[in-house]
Amino acid sequence: MPDADRPQELPARLLTDPEMINACRVRDFGRVFRLVKTRAGIYPSMVARRCELTPSRVGEVIAGRRQLLHMDVVERIADGLRIPGHMLGLARRPWETPQALVVTEREAPQAAEPEQLAPASLSGPDVDSILALTTRTNLSAATLEAFRSSIEDYWRRDDQHGGEALRPAVVGQLRYVVGLLKESRPPAIQNGLYGIAAELARLTGWTYFDARQYNQARAYFTEALQLAKTIDDRQFMANVLACMSLQATYQDKPADSLALVTAAQDQARSAPDTTARVLSMLSMREAFAHATLGSQTSTHRAITEAHRQFEQIQVSDPDPSWVAYFDEPKLIVDTGIAHGRLGEAATAEPLIVDALRREARNNQRGRAFHAFWLARTQLDQGKLDQACHTATQALEPASAVASERVSGHLREFYDQLAPHRQEPVALAFEARLRELLPPVSGSLHP
């Protein structure tokens, strides 16, 4: 096929888009055709011509009235739209072979007639390819710092507003950085890019975890783990495993939680530069796992180890940026939550009160989350008025942040009020809950 007639490649940003990847994996061609129209400007009539289908057949697929199942049709779609074979469960397509490896007979060069030159009709590189050419020559240590700065900003905004609105930007930057990894670069730059990609994947996983979309969260956490393993960043691998451990507690899989945090501690201890702050954080995650299992002795031992490690922290320690959040108020509130998970409400309450007093005002999700735990410990002690007052205070910051995890906790607190539903304080909390956190679709909660 002459170059001018060869189908134009799809934009890299489309081929790496999770929605496109999933649509291809399940061969949902209606969705594929819609995506190539909106993201690549390839309209149904062009799809029909490229893939040797009738326009009416393409229209029926897009409308969901017809499926395309025959292998020869799937292959025509892959070739016509230039979708790599592996995305559709096919073998590598002939056109995927790099041009440099294709052996062709050399022809004598011929001078082109002036009227034969029509630049406007010739296929050329898309915008993604042009931009990629410029970035290849400009990546430096300063570029890596710019990436890291943007990640820190993402985390700040996640604390304040939740990750729902941030996720598309984070995923886009993740795919962009992963694309950069395909180029050959100096080791320092390449390793830095792997670390940045790992952190972006972890952040994406975190936003899904906070939205209680656990399968997606696990997929991105796993990707983060693989990226960190490539550069043997064992501290960061420990960090990701700790996130997965916390998620397992939410999925009511305490044995998995303990196994994951134990693996995290093994990774951290095998790294020569692991700091006391990292080990303290991991011990607290271990305490959560033991508390969920109901093991009092093991929980107390892990709490003690977390505090012992925290006391070893030095100002000069080379702490990774991702563990900076684990400061003294966080240690204290997590200690309270571990006791609360264990059912030791009287021990937990003053610890959480102290931490809330010192917590940053702009951390909306943290304040709402920790206030919920305070309300729960108060309710466990029979302090109904205090518990409802605390939970009502938690609703304001909870409504300011998109976090189904926090909203879900406050609806769970409403469920725990079942024996007291007719009490004035419980009715007041319910009214405020309905006002600030309306029920999700299909929910049985208020």
Image (tube, rainbow, N blue to C red):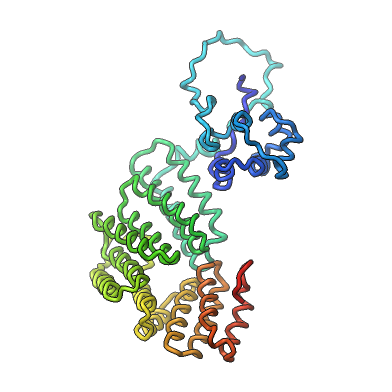
Relative depth, front residue between 267 and 189: 267
Instruction: Residue at 54%, 88% (x, y): give it.
Output: 420
Residue 155 is at least partly visible in this image: yes
Looking at the figure, which quarter contains the N terminus? top right
Seen at 64% across and 40% down, the residue is 29
In terms of depth relative to the viewer, which is nearer, 188 or 198? 198
Total labels drawn: 0
User: Which percent across, then down, holds residue 158?
Assistant: 50, 64
Extreme residue in the top direction: 108
Pick the quarter of the image with the C terminus: bottom right
Q: Decide: is 406 above or below 148.
A: below
Relative vertical location of residue 335 with respect to residue 244 in this rendering, above or below: below
Left or right side of 155 for 122: right
**Residue for point 38% across, 51% down:** 225
Q: Nearer the viewer, residue 308 or 110?
A: 308
Residue 191: image location, x then y, percent: 35, 45
